[in-house]
Image: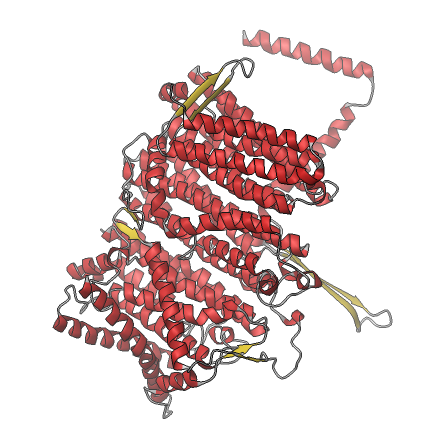
Amino acid sequence: MIAALLVSLIQVLIVLLGAPLLVGAMRQLRAVMEGRVGGGVLQPWRDLLKLLRKAPQRPEGTGAAFRLAPLLGVACCAVAAAAIPLVSTRTGLGAAADLIAAVALLTLSTAALALAGLDTATAFGGMGASREMTITALAEPAILTAVFALAAKVGSTNLPAIVATTLGHGARLASPATLLAAVALGVVVLAETGRLPVDNPATHLELTMVHEAVVLEYSGPDLALIELGAAMRLTVLLGLWSSLFAPWGVATSAGPTRLLLALAVFAGKTLALGALIAAAEVFMAKLRLFRVPELLAGSFLLAVLAVTASFFLA
Amino acid sequence: MSVNLVGTALATSAGLSGMAAAAALCSPVRVRVPMVGVLSALLGAAGLVAGGAALAGHGFSVRMPDLLPLAGISLQVDALSGVFLAVTGAVIIAASVYGIGYAAGPARGRLAQALWPLFAFSLLLVPAAASVSTLLVAWELMAIGSVLLVVSGDPADGRVREAGVWYAVMTHLGLVTILIGLVWLSAAAHTETFAGLRLAAAGVSPAVRGGVFVLLLLGFGSKAGMAPLHAWLPRAHPEAPSPVSALMSAAMVNLGVYGLIRFGLDLLGGGSRWWWLATLVLGALSAVYGIVQAAVANDLKRLLAYSTVENLGLILVGVGAAGVFEDSGHPLLAAAALTAALLHTATHAGFKTLLFLTAGSVLHATGTRDLDELGGLRARMPVTTALFALGALGAAALPGGAGFPSEWLLLQSLIHGLAVPGIVVVVVLPVAVGAIALSAGLAVATFVKALGTGLLAKPRSAAAEHAHEVSGTMRAGMGVVAAACVALAVVPGATAPALMRATAAALRGPGTSLALGATRQLTALGSTLSPLLVVALTLGAVLLLRAGLTLVSGRKRRRAPVPLWDCGAPPLTARMEYTATSFAEPLQRVFDDVLAPESDIDVTPHAESAYLVERIAYSRAVPDRVEHRLYNPVLHTVRRAGRAARALADGSVHRYLGYGFGSVVLLLIVLAAAQ
């Protein structure tokens, strides 16, 4: 029990400390590929520490929803990080580490942030909230249907059980059902973390921005939490994806050396996925907002195909 | 002689209902409203006790042959009835207490106040009925009571009258289909008591049973707001006074589900697979259509009414899945699906009551239900805003909300449904999961919109600016149901033993695989959900972060107010805010083909020159498309037929006598031919 709690704690800490580094690495890779010098891998951490030292402020007319959203964003990601078997399948939440609950927690943080955007009563906040909720709402069918495809084979939505089963039957990963579900969930991860082609994290143009419009009024420590929350969300979702579709390296026991190795493999996998996204983003343009539903509908269709494939090709 | 708790409680509620109605008719207006409220709340408490006792395993059965001519009254309460009795009773308590502070204008009148306890009692009578005739009488009492209560708010208002007519016609068409179905069944089975039907149903031919089920699905489905028979719901719920809306939306519509479970699963014993596939598909359709309409609705109570269509659709998906699983010999899966449906019935009743009561408070304080004119209520009505947020969390089915555990359980049962053989199931189940997920996602967007534009942000009209917090009794009514919502959201496992008894009563099979006694978590079919742990961890992390932040930022607790970013062109006015309409615009575009919104731009040129514009008027409406495409043609045809029939009645007595003679001759010929 103590070992399991320790695993969860380690997972939360690695996500908390590593997430800004992942974002820094992705930005640096993109800068290098685009021929810029870049701010270095540590730049997001420097930004965070600087923001944390500033005085907290209260934009006029904002209320509890505005102040609570940054805290909830980080908290939800932390709980999800504790539940998902990123490093070991023996997490502290045990049987309660449910895939649907983890996904719903991340949706909760999105909803809280959208409410904060609306609470500011500015056009930017409302616009961003509206776009963010539209994308979230349409991403949901693809997520849960892909979950269906994965869970139907294992007979449970328990995350450690799914990961342990995949680890035990490595050949299942190559089945059409798993591959289709991987693509479907991959598209959704991009949409949920606000990456290209759904949202451009580097833009502040009101015609196109989604996430950045919601958080426009945040400053100081609140902004630091928002940035940290966004980075953690990216890390957690990439970690979830790799745990589901590339679980190699995830420890099934709680031995210290095994855990250290798993930690290194997790960092490597997440960095590799991040690098892949960053490299792809160099060559990609943002989709028009009203083309995004087509992308998400395509992802949903792939997920339905995954379910059907898992039935017919079992 | 031992006293039967269920029977005593039901008798008490009948007595209280009569007392409250008498008090309403006799007492002066000043004491009338509080007295009716208190007595009705006690009536609800009696219903809750009856339901709770039934769920704890106490049965009750009574026959009163002299009470009604020909058939008499038969009552029987088992655990399945208990679920609906308990839910209804709890809703009555909250809505009655709330109604004391809410009633105003015509709703304080003798008739409106006397109707309330009678309607409430009829809601308790329906699930307790044990014969076809008793059920039909209770059903009709419930229909009449609710129709009169819908129009009791402001009978002079044209929209209220229109809603009343729609509702009266649709509820009676539903009654007619149920009546035909049940009479057909009783005639075929040669009995009208439920106990007799249960035994005789197996001997009835499958064709008759199928026909009866289709009629019952239409009748009970229309009461449960099943698309496309939902058209009365978004009309009647917004126009009714808010406690009435709450009682209708959280308690009355459930009885449609009760009817389907009682007759389809229990008395008819499951039947064929196509019955339940039809139920499942119609449920999924209702869920998606309801929430898409809710996402673009601007009227707060209309939004909630469409959300009811969505949630009842989810419940029907659960009932349909239970039927499919039962038919294919998977009793454990069937029990899990039915448990999910019953749990969602309870959780939906909780958060929908809370939402309708808080929406009523908003309406009471501002006089408008239009989200585009609300906003800024969080500072003016903090209690209402907090409670609405709690209800919205439940309706959005997010962790910490009441709707989450029940939707989770529903998904669990569907995920395991691939074990059922058959191509249709393989196609239907993933699409049903997709439909549930889409409705859950859109529900998040819908309730972010309702909370964010309706109660947060800045006021968009003078009415919202001058709002005030509502009275103590209204807050008490909302508080009671809020506490129930929190309990259902955090420890849903506590309901497991009761729900297991109820599913066992409906399915007559082995019990469900829900973990018994584990109140901290919900375990079903190899998966576990622990809402308590999730909520506690998240709240703990929030507090920890807050403490850490205070430590880092060095006790700079006071936040300095700073102006909002106004693009350098102050001041920011309320007209620059995003409204509910603008929030829903992207979704409206995405679902353009489903919603078919009507927008109209009217450009008036200047009198001097056609090139100068004097005025531009833009209007947009999202009519209910089902209503347009399905109901309007029928209404037109009926109206045309009525007008054409006028030519038959020209006032000539000879002609009328001729009609009579002709009919008798025709009848005799038919009878002779039939001999």
Side (left or right) of B457 relative to A314:
right
Q: Nearer the viewer, residue B619 or B266?
A: B266
Marks counted in the figure total 0
Q: Quadrant of residue A229?
A: bottom left
Q: Is residue B560 above or below residue B26?
A: below
In the rendered view, tell whether residue B58 sits above or below residue A122: above
Q: Is residue B249 visible?
A: yes
Q: Quadrant of residue B567?
A: bottom right
- What residue is rendered at 72% in x and 44% in y? B105
Indicate the colouring scheme.
secondary structure
Q: Is residue B155 above or below residue B649?
A: below
In this view, the residue in front, A297 or B568, is B568
Q: Nearer the viewer, residue B486 or A161?
A: B486
Q: Is residue B232 above or below residue A60?
A: above
**Residue A289, image x, y percentages:** 50, 69
Residue B195, quarter of picture: top left
Q: Residue at x 38, y 85 (%)?
A: A49
For residue B226, side relative to residue B536 (left or right): right
Q: Nearer the viewer, residue B532 or B150?
A: B532
Residue farthest along the bottom direction in this orientation: A37
In percent of width and height, residue A243 lies at 25, 66
B131 relative position to B534: left or right: right
Q: Quadrant of the N terminus of chain A?
A: bottom left
A182 sits left or right of B261 in the view? left
- Residue sitting at x 76%, y 13%: B658
Q: Is residue A302 visible?
A: no
Q: State the image coordinates of residue B232 (x, y, percent, origin top left).
A: 60, 41
Q: Position of residue B578 (x, y in %)?
A: 60, 68
